[in-house]
Image (cartoon, grey):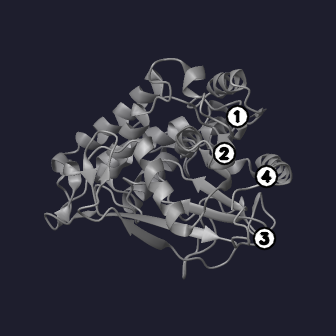
Amino acid sequence: MNSIGIVETKYFTFAEPPEEMTLKNGVKLGPITIAYETYGKLNDDRSNAILIFHSLTADAHVAGFHEGAKKPGWWDDMVGPGKAFDTNKYFVICSNVLGACKGSTGPASINPKTSKPYGLSFPMVTIDDMVSAQKRLLDHLGIKRLLSCCGGSMGGLQALKWAVMYPEYQASVILIATNYRHTAQQIALHEVCRQAIMSDPDWQNGDYYGKSIPARGMALSRMIGHITYMSEKSMDEKFGRKLIGKEKVGYDFSHDFEVENYLKYRGDSFVQRFDANTYLYLTKTLDYFDLTEDGNLVNALKPVTANFLIVSFSSDWLYPSYQSKELARALKANDVDVSDIEINSSYGHDAFLVEVEGLSRLIKSYLQRMTKEYSYVK
């Protein structure tokens, strides 16, 4: 299908001293820049806006091509003319989260007080803080209400928090392969990834900017991450025990299997495109997330007024379907209109990026229904 074409990343700066933004932990931060992209046109009554949230290591570039780039945005199959998020109908916004490294203010940004990168002096941000920054962006764009907000994985946590923090602001919420709090297993996996980075001598306690980056730790961390994104079946179907250009194993520590080569490629490419400190911060942000806080999910969701579409995948063991179903039950206990769909897929957690056909049908139909059923605040 057609791509939206050439797109450009834009930047919005706010919270300039002395009007700094107060984070959830009480620390003040500013100035803050948020990178974002928009696709399609806002209609006359400003009722067709959709906010998409990215996952852990993605960015604001969700669709189309940057000038001279060979690869499109990370969800180009889903966003564009005639696609699930049809840019002929909807005005789509995606921003890089606060604390990231793809244009928004984060640990790799220059601290105006020192003229050096923040590094570990950057304050810890929460999902709440990310949402607050996104709300500032939408105010800047003059959007008073969203038709929908949508996110997968970490993006789903943001969409869920939007529905709680700003309950009247969106008519609907689409959650994909996500949950309402990180479990002990999810926290444990992230801690192993963080330790891989922090154990690299080149990490230098976060002060590696302008020096040697912790490439080995970063690559190892990403290799661990990719194992969690796939399922056993998808790995077996894609790689099995296939050897790399040889007829038999070498009985040494060189790479024999294709899956080894794949993980090395993923690790090495990650080093070139992401910041190590940012990865530490964002994984910690995810681990801190717990919508309930007091343990009562039904109570935590009482402010919600939006309709929900919740999509999970049968083979996702990182964000398993039972967590989505717990969330759906708690929403229904608050009389929220919820469509809870589990898609049978072998792709694991990555299914939300690759199960395009089934996901597109669901989202197209759901957005059409939301457009018909609701009137919007201008």
Q: Local crowd at mark 1 within 10 Å, few (<14), some, or many (≥20)?
A: many
Instruction: Select label 1 or label 3 by which is in front.
Output: 3
Helix, strand or loop under label 3: loop
Q: CA distance from mark 2 to mark 1?
A: 8 Å
Using the rendered view, name the quadrant where residue 187 is placed.
top left
Q: In the rendered image, is residue 257 in sight? A: no
Residue visible at 71% across and 30% down?
314
The three-letter amino acid code for the residue at tag 1 is Phe
Left or right? Give the position of 269 relative to 29. right
Q: Which one is closest to the eye, mark 3 or mark 4?
A: 3
- Residue identifier under label 1: 313
SS at mark 2? helix
Q: Are discs 2 and 1 less than 8 Å apart at CB?
A: yes
* Mark 4 or 1: the one toward you: 4
Up-down: is 5 above or below 340?
Answer: below
Q: CA distance from mark 1 to mark 3?
A: 29 Å
* Residue occupied by mark 2: 352
What is the CA distance from the residue labelled 4 to the residue labelled 1? Answer: 14 Å
Q: Is residue 327 above or below residue 354?
A: above
Q: Residue furthest front?
A: 378
Furthest residue in direction bottom, as rendered: 68
| Occupied quadrant, residue 341 | top right
Distance between mark 3 and mark 2 Cα atoms: 23 Å
Residue type beneath disc 4: Ser
- In the image, 351 versus 12, the foreground residue is 12
Residue marked by disc 3: 88
Graded by Cα atoms within 10 Å as few (under 14), some (14 to 19) or many (20 or more), the crowding at tag 3 reads some
